[in-house]
Image (cartoon, rainbow, N blue to C red):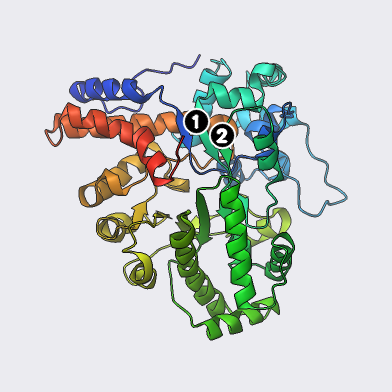
Amino acid sequence: MMQLQEERFFLPDPAQRRVALNLHTQVKDLPLVCVHGHVNPAMLAASSYSWGSPVDLLIIPDHYIFRMLYSQGISLEELGITPKAQESHFTPPDHRQIWQTVCDHWHLFRGTPSSLWLRDELRNIFGIEEKMNSANAQKIYDLLEEKLHSPVFQPRQMFESFHIEVLATTDAATDTLDHHRAIRQSDWSGRVIPTFRPDAVVNIDNQHFAASIERLGEVSASEISGYRSYIAALEQRRRFFKEMGATATDHGATSTYTERLSEAEAERIFQRALQGEASADDARRFTGHMLIEMARMSVEDGLVMQLHLGSYRNHNALLHERFGADMGADIPTASEFTHNFKPLLDAFGRERDLTLIVFNLDESTYSRELAPLAGHYPALHLGPPWWFFDSLNGIRRFFDNVIETAGIYNTVGFNDDTRAYPSIPARHDLWRRASADWLAGLVVRGIIDEEDAAEMIVDLAYDLAKKAYKLKI
């Protein structure tokens, strides 16, 4: 049986545990503000939705899980991941078999965030107190399958039981947002909003860039013949997203490089990209220029700008070729901000009305560069630990690295960044516990008092995210 201690994740010092438990109690039942993630809005647009099997819900969408199994020699095919081009010999395994494989190897996840999240999901959402292992794999599968057929576990009902106040999805710039429209037109009161993500029509090293631009022209009802019409189409799409409730954009880039191009140079690179002739240097410069352009648009339309930087996407080329993106092969790279980010900050870093939220996978940048930059420029804020560092130790390191220089009020609270819908409450609870424990450490060392800590824990758990993402209820 799983034993979930009320004081889990807290450091062992009794005085610190007492303060941490008191702080966590103050915020554990606050609503969840889910400002960034990858939940499919289709499941919330439908009044009745089929999850499929427990594997469809908990394994196939979650690259945190299958990347670990892949690292131990278990193929993605064995886990039910279908190749992009259906191969004549490929027959997906039975989902019970997949679940058994996962449980047979669950010891691989000991000490990882995935283990903590799924343990909490099984216990707190589905009422399953068994530990995952080979012996009880089929029993747990049966219990989950039964629950998933219950009306209580429909997506909308789970949304309400999770106490989600608002959930932001991440949507391509060319998305019609039909599912968001259906949610808005339904009689359901849950607040689900889109987020504008233009990577496919900005990062010109994308092999489908020309096709993406053609699609952008279609959805914006415009003919994109050059750079000016391209910019106009992007501005039109941002207006549409904002009309549909969006408060933020999201941008991904491998490099932190920014550069202001002349319009003539931007036009030349854009035309080369449409012809499939852009170089790697063209891609670096154009993406860097477009980050500045997107900041300019955010100043004008008020959308919060999120930047996810420093991930070498799809590092495993063969896996990407066979299965596509998001197969667990995104790897952190070294980053530099002080020089690379200066053109963007020169242009818009002093704008008080701009909220520019940076996420980065190079932890060494936080105390050396990002905290000092965020502690100076009014526009710049630090997103919480992301991807590999969305973990108990990653959160603690983040606080230790940035708060002395930037304070908590140049950070933006938490986002769960999830693809696995049932993990949302577990992820927020881990953040709230880690925050409470870290603040309690400051209290017992006399750095802050309990009155300050009581205000700070509410800010970290709830208020900072609402303020940063301009979420008015």
Q: Callout 2: helix, strand or loop?
A: loop
Answer with the quarter of the image where residue 21 lies: top left
Residue at 52 percent across and 59 percent down: it is 252
Other-residue count near label 1 (Cα within 10 Å), few / some / many at <14 / 14–19 / ≥20: some
- How far apart are labels 1 and 2 at the CA level? 7 Å
Residue denoted by label 1:
165
Residue at 37 percent across and 56 percent down: it is 353
Answer with the quarter of the image where residue 265 lies: bottom right
Would residue 250 appear left or right of 345 to someone viewing this image?
Answer: right
Would residue 39 appear left or right of 366 to someone viewing this image?
Answer: right
Residue 103 locus on image (x, y percent):
61, 28
Residue 124 locus on image (x, y percent):
51, 19
Identify the residue at the far left of this view: 446
Q: Nearer the viewer, residue 266 or 426?
A: 266
Q: Nearer the viewer, residue 402 or 325?
A: 402
Is residue 250 something one can see in this rendering? yes
Residue at 41 percent across and 25 percent down: it is 30
Depicted 100 relative to depicted 342: above or below: above
N-terminal-most mark, 1 or 2? 1
Q: Which mark identifies residue 191?
A: 2
Depicted 331 relative to depicted 133: above or below: below
Asked whether disc 1 touches disc 2, contact meaning CB atoms under 8 Å apart, the reply is yes
Q: Amino acid at mark 1?
A: Glu
Is residue 131 something one can see in this rendering? no
Q: Which mark identifies residue 364?
A: none
